Image (spheres, rainbow, N blue to C red):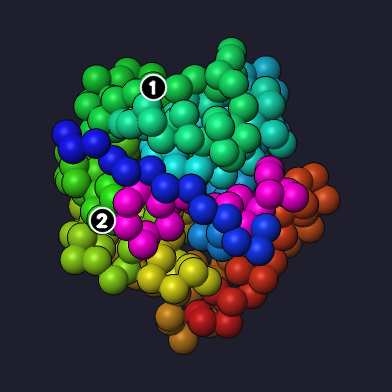
Amino acid sequence: MRETEIIVSEEAGVRTLHFGSSWVQGAMRVARPFKLELAYTREMMLPLLLRDWSDRVDMSPRVLVVGLGAGSIVKFLHHHFPHWRLTVVEINPAVHAAACQHFRLPATGENLRMVFADAADFVDGSRQHFDWIIVDGFDPNARMGRLCSATFFDDCARLLASDGMFCINLLSRRKEYAVCQRYIEEAFAGQGMMLRSADPGNALMLAGKPAIVQGGTESMSRVDSTDGDDPVSDVLRQALARAPALKAATGLDLSPALHAWLQAS
């Protein structure tokens, strides 16, 4: 594997990570290192509003994060939910070193585990179940490689706990976008939803056990229905009702994103 060029730059108080190209692989506002700077990373926290995580006090939620980048999502979850058990799979140890040195990624410990491996190999060989799987993995040219395959998504579905959540960031302008969507629909029996991100070119896709929404494969489409009974809209309205509590607990306000998705529905 060709060595990845890791570039860290800073402008107007925001530090960014690049892998030798113009694609932003992560960002941090230096004055607020545990906030989620990029819109799509905030939006990927939507599952916090779609399940009752409080019933896992005795058995802390197990979260698998595929792709470290600048560590924004990992830092946010570890900071606000320190008892949760995070497993992070990153193919390049140099990315981890950069996240520690420049982006204040916390040290590994009992509840923060780093695994240096190709995530496709990791999920293929793992027998551990996770309550939440978060996928945000790209190469320097924003390609997903083996992470865009039927086998990878089938393995992710297999590793989800009985009421687990799956969440992935996709780039809607890439050829892989439609291919990944089809594979995810097949892996999760057509149950889930697609949401356009406020970050241009990004899209958020969610699926789960049990289904996030009912209604078959049609519910996998992006939120653009004019049907007032759209099950995706029902889910978003329920999430909106829970958003103030999440904001009070973590400072993360998902209300603007939820309003935008509802307006598009």
Residue 116 within the magenta-colored segment of the rendering: no
- Is 263 located above or below residue 186 in the figure? below
The image quarter in which residue 116 lies: top left
Q: Which residue is mark 2?
A: 141
Which residue corresponds to mark 1?
115
Quarter of image, res 54: top right
Q: Quadrant of residue 181?
A: bottom left
| SS under mark 2 | loop
Query: Split into 4 quadrants, where in the image is the N terminus?
Result: top left
Residues rendered magenta in the picture: 14-37
Which one is closest to the eye, mark 1 or mark 2? 2
x and y, in percent, of residue 206 in the image: 42, 54
Residue that appears at 50% across and 80% down: 265
Residue 86 vs residue 236, the one in the foreground: 86
Which type of secondary structure does the marked residue at label 1 adopt?
strand
Tell me, yes or no, whether the highlighted magenta stretch contains residue 25: yes
Horizontal and vertical percent position of residue 232: 49, 67
Q: Residue furthest bottom?
A: 226
Question: The residue under label 2 is which amino acid type?
Answer: Asn
Give the answer, above or below, for where 137 lies relative to 142: above
- Image position, residue 26 (x, y; %): 49, 51
75 to the left or right of 32: left
Q: Residue at x 32, y 57 (%)?
A: 21
Side of 123 relative to 176 (left or right): right
Residue 65: where, in percent of width, then height?
Answer: 45, 36
| Figure label count | 2
The amino acid pointed to by label 1 is Val
User: Few, some or many C-alpha atoms within 10 Å of disc 2 (few <14, some 14-19, many ≥20)?
Assistant: few
Spatial CA distance of label 1 from label 2 is 23 Å
Q: Is residue 123 visible?
A: no
